Amino acid sequence: MRFFLAGIMQGSHRGALLHKQEYRGRLKTLLEEHFPEADVYDPLADHPKSLEYGDAKGRDVFFYHNRLCGEIDVLLAFVPEASMGTAIEMWEAYQAGRAVITISPLAHNWAVKFLSHVLYSDVDSFEVELSSGRLAERIAEIRDGGEAEK
């Protein structure tokens, strides 16, 4: 199963800064532990110097990631605060019929609320569902064409 690890990077920073990215390692490890066959794509791992890219390369990477979100099986989005890039990735995955799993306290934000098949308020609640096997069931339901409950 192919996962795309989406999540806040630049957020609302006005300069060339990244938010803390420690969540990426933890989420990737959790996915690999509970989905041993998982192929987890982390855009930051493939593009750690992306803030230094010129416009042409940055544009190519941006649109490549958005296309990829429509081709993977599951998009896992970490959205502790608003993130335009993550919202676009969620949209692309959702529009392509891919499972969108979101970790965010922004339950009333329409992009988060309406583009998530499954929504967790924090990483701990995500981990509980992952460990119980319930998340794997929900992903299977979504992939079979059903809407998982939120």
Image (cartoon, grey):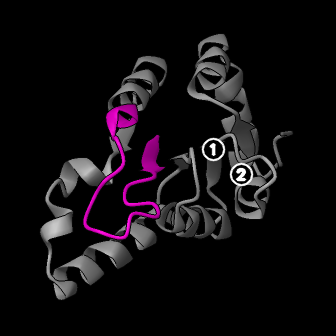
Q: Is residue 81 left or right of residue 13?
A: right
Q: Is residue 116 above or below residue 104?
A: below
Which image quadrant is residue 3 in? top left
Q: Earlier in the sequence, mark 1 or mark 2?
A: 1
Quadrant assignment for the C terminus: top right
Residue 24, relative to residue 69: is it above or below? above
Q: Which residue bears the numbered disc 2?
A: 116
- Residue 79: give x, y in percent of width and height: 56, 48
Name the secondary structure under disc 2: loop
Q: Could you say where residue 139 lies in the image, as x and y percent from the top left?
A: 67, 38
Along the horizontal axis of the image, is 116 left or right of 68? right
Residue 48 coordinates in the image, percent (x, y):
17, 53
Q: In this rendered view, identify the residue nearer to me: 136 or 56.
A: 56
| Furthest-front residue in this view | 14
Q: From this view, report whether residue 100 is shown above or below residue 133.
A: below
Give the CA separation, mark 1 to mark 2. 6 Å
Residue at screen point 52% across, 61% down: 83
Tell me which secondary structure the magenta stretch mostly adopts.
loop
11 or 139: nearer the viewer: 11
